[in-house]
Image (cartoon, helix red, strand yellow):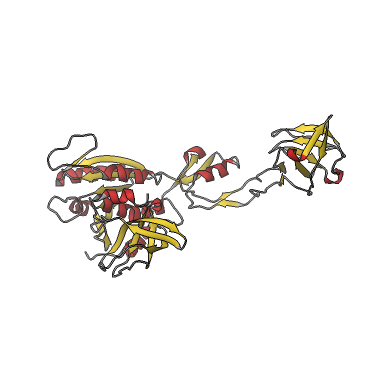
Amino acid sequence: MALRSVDDVLHYLLADAPKWGHEFRDLVHSLGAVLAEDVIAASNVPPADNSAMDGYAFRYCDLQMGRPIPISQRIPAGVIGEALQPRTAARIFTGAFIPQDADTVVAQEDCETSGGAVTVNAAVNKGQHIRPCGQDISFGQRLLAAGHRLQAADLGLLASLGVSQIAVSKVIKVALMSTGDELREPGEELGEGQIYNSNRPMLAAMIRALGCEVVDLGIVADSPAATKAALLLARDSADVVISSGGVSVGEEDHVKAQVEALGELQFWKLAIKPGKPLAYGKLSKVPFFGLPGNPVSSFVTFGLLVRPYLLAMQGVAEPLVPQWPAVANFEWPKAGSRQEYLRARVMPSATGLQVDIHPQQSSGALTSVSWCNALAVIPIGVTLQRGDGVEIIFLRDLS
C-alpha cells in the first residue's frame, strides 16, 4: 500500500468512526464524559436578587450619610427576610436574598452600629452590591452544547442548576494488547535481550484519560496462533481494539497478517515520522488500530490519530488537536518525505511562543516525550531556519 498523508488518514478515520449511544450518568461520575444533548437552564442562577457583601440592606431613598437608621431584621444566607419597613435597615450576609422593597446594600466596613441602629459613612450608589436574579444563568439559556467534554467547572455549573444526572456518551471499551517475546512487565526480572513494556501503561493511561475503559490483554507471544487468539478475544470483549507492535514487515510481526485473515485492513503505512507502520481495519465490525512498537511512535500516532477517532465516536464536536503558531529556535535543514513531529519544548517570550527541540529524536527515545511539552510539526518537503515560523501541538492536547 502507498503511504497516506496524515490529513488524508484523519479525514478518513473521522468519517469512519461509528457514533456511540448515550446513557444517563450521575454528575459526580461524569468528568471527561461527552454530552449527548444540549443543556438548557431550567431555572435562574441566582434564583433571586442576593447580597454580594456582608453588610446592610436599605431603601436607597432612606439613606442619608451620617444619619442613624434602625436595624429591623437580620437575614443570614438561607433565610428569607420580611419586607423591609420604610426608614429601617436589614443586617444581611453574603448570598442572602434581598428583602422585598430593599434596593441597595452597603458593606459593613462602610457602616457603624450603635444602639440597634446603623449609620452609613460612605458615598452610596443605588443598587450597589446586589447580584440580580439570573445574573449568572438565565432560564432557557443554552449552557453547554452536545459534543462538549465535561470539565470540572462544568460539573459545578450543572450542580448550580440542581442537575444530578446528565445524558452522556456510553463508555467505550478498548482492548489493549502488546506483542513481542522480548517484552516483560515492570517488576519482573529481565532476561537476556528483554526489555520492559513501556507502551502498555502509557497507552492505557491515554485511553482512560478519554473516558474509555481498558480491557487489558497484556503481552501476546510472537506467533500466528497466539496473535489470532488474542485478536479474537479482543474483538469479542471490546468496542475498539488497539495493539502495539507486530504491524511492520519482520518475520515475527504477525498482527497485520492475522487482522487481514480475520477481517480487513483498510490502510497500512503513513507518511508520518515517527510512526510509519500504523494499521487500521476491522475485525468483523470492531475497529482495529495497530500501533508501532517503538514507544515514541506509539505515543505520537495514538495522540494524533486514535485519540480523535475515540473522541469522534463519543460525539465530540471538535475532535482534532489544535495547532498553534510559534517561532523555531532550531534549524531543520533536511526536507523529509514524511510529515515529522519533533519532540519540542515551547516557552513564551515577548515576541510569542519560542520552540526548542530535544537533541534525541529517535522513535525509541521516550525521554524526549517526557521532556517535551509540545510537538513541532514539519510538513513534507519543508526545511526550517532559526527564526522561521513553525506550527506546534501542545502535549496537553494529546495526552
- Tell me residue 328's x, y (percent): 36, 63
- Residue 41 seen in this snapshot: yes
Image quadrant holding the N terminus, namely bottom left
Q: Which quadrant of the view contains residue 185? A: top left
Q: Residue at x 16, y 42 (%)?
A: 194
Toward the viewer: 236 or 317?
317
Toward the viewer: 246 or 313?
246
Does 48 sit left or right of 26 as displayed?
right
Toward the viewer: 34 or 382?
382
Q: Residue at x 74, y 36 (%)?
A: 92
- Tell me residue 375's x, y (percent): 35, 57
- Tell me residue 105's x, y (percent): 76, 42
In the image, residue 164 sits, relative to residue 290, either above or below, namely above
Toward the viewer: 393 or 317?
393
In the image, residue 57 sits, relative to residue 257, either above or below, namely above
Q: Residue at x 48, y 40 (%)?
A: 25
Q: Residue furthest top?
A: 115
Does 338 sit left or right of 221 as displayed?
right
- Residue 283 seen in this snapshot: no
Q: Residue at x 24, y 57 (%)?
A: 265
Task: Count the marks.
Answer: 0
Q: Which quadrant of the view contains residue 109? A: top right
In the image, residue 93 sits, relative to residue 294, either above or below, namely above
Q: Residue furthest front?
A: 350
- Tell me residue 314's x, y (percent): 42, 50
